[in-house]
Image (cartoon, rainbow, N blue to C red):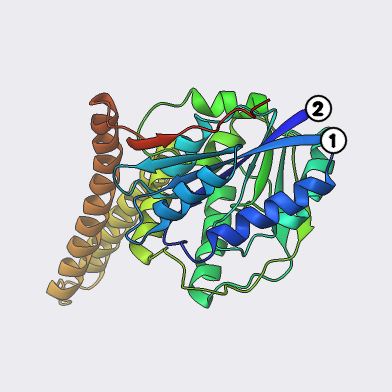
Amino acid sequence: MKKVSFVIPCYQSSLTLRKVVEEIQETMKKLTQYSYEIILVNDCSPDDTFSVIQELCRENLNICGVNLAKNFGQHGALMAGFHQVTGDILVCLDDDGQTPADEVGKLLERLEAGDDVVYARYSHKQHSLFRNFGSYINEKMAQFLLGKPKELCVSSYFAARRFVVEEMLKYENAYPYVIGLVLRTTKKISNVEVKHRQREVGESGYTLAKLLGLWFSGFTAFSTKPLRIATVTGFFCAMAGFLYALYTVIKKFVNPAVPVGFSSLMSAIMFIGGMLMLMLGLIGEYIGRMYICINNAPQFVVRDLIPAREKED
């Protein structure tokens, strides 16, 4: 009997978490060919989410609770949960009930058919316009910078084989990005269609600052393409400056009476200076993250751990 490990990062989900867990339990009763465990990771939520996790751990033998010492973000919380996984198959989903746990059988069926990782794909996402736009940008950037296949949709709801988890755990640096870790591990990745639900309680914890931080973490840790883009942009800016200077000289010889424009000179200086600052900032971002990783900044710090209990005879 294969074991399925559900990992759920939790943040401000005290009102929804119990319902998600109950849905997993009811679903797994029907999938009798699998045993399962549930790993709940509290990402230093400001509400009483960890109290709910403690209650669930007391009520159920196969639930593990992890309480992080500070907020490390969704991907840091996922990595903390991966360290507690004991199953043959990993399933990650959200704590707000929008990812349908009762459709996990579709993901497991596709894994059994031979794929290594299966992502849920939603025909219509029930997110806000801001979150949908952020997801779209994330998809396009992952496609361009990380080599994600164009037809593949990535999401927070996915299933993976055990060896994929083991490979992700080899990454010990700060700024983990699960999508990047998956894409560099295997090419046997597919999608299954599931229904995305409307959020019943609260609102998304992702802000613009968090989304930008997540993108920087992923793309500076797993791709050098931003540096190549900076190099190519710098080359074209230099060529444009050279051609403009050549044009100015020729214009002066053809018509000496035409004054050399101060405004055009300042525009060129501001443009080139801005591009230089942008490229230096990008290089500094890489160097800064390398410095933080060299100093062994943690992916996560566990304050409390409630291990799953063995079934009593």
In the image, residue 99 above or below residue 64 = below
Q: Residue at x 26, y 24 (%)?
A: 294
Graded by Cα atoms within 10 Å as few (under 14), some (14 to 19) or many (20 or more), the crowding at tag 1 reads: few
Which one is nearer the viewer's eye here, 263 or 177? 177
| Residue 15 percent location from the top left of the image | 49, 66
Give the farthest residue toward the right: 113
Q: Are marks 2 and 1 in contact (CB under 8 Å)?
A: yes
Which one is nearer the viewer's eye here, 14 or 283? 14
- What is the CA distance from the residue labelled 2 to the residue labelled 1? 6 Å
**Residue bearing mark 1:** 33
**Residue 1: assigned label:** 2
153 horizontally vs 199: left or right: right
**Residue 256: assigned label:** none
Which one is nearer the viewer's eye here, 182 or 79? 79
Three-letter residue code for mark 1: Gln
Which one is nearer the viewer's eye here, 67 or 76? 67
119 horizontally vs 109: left or right: left
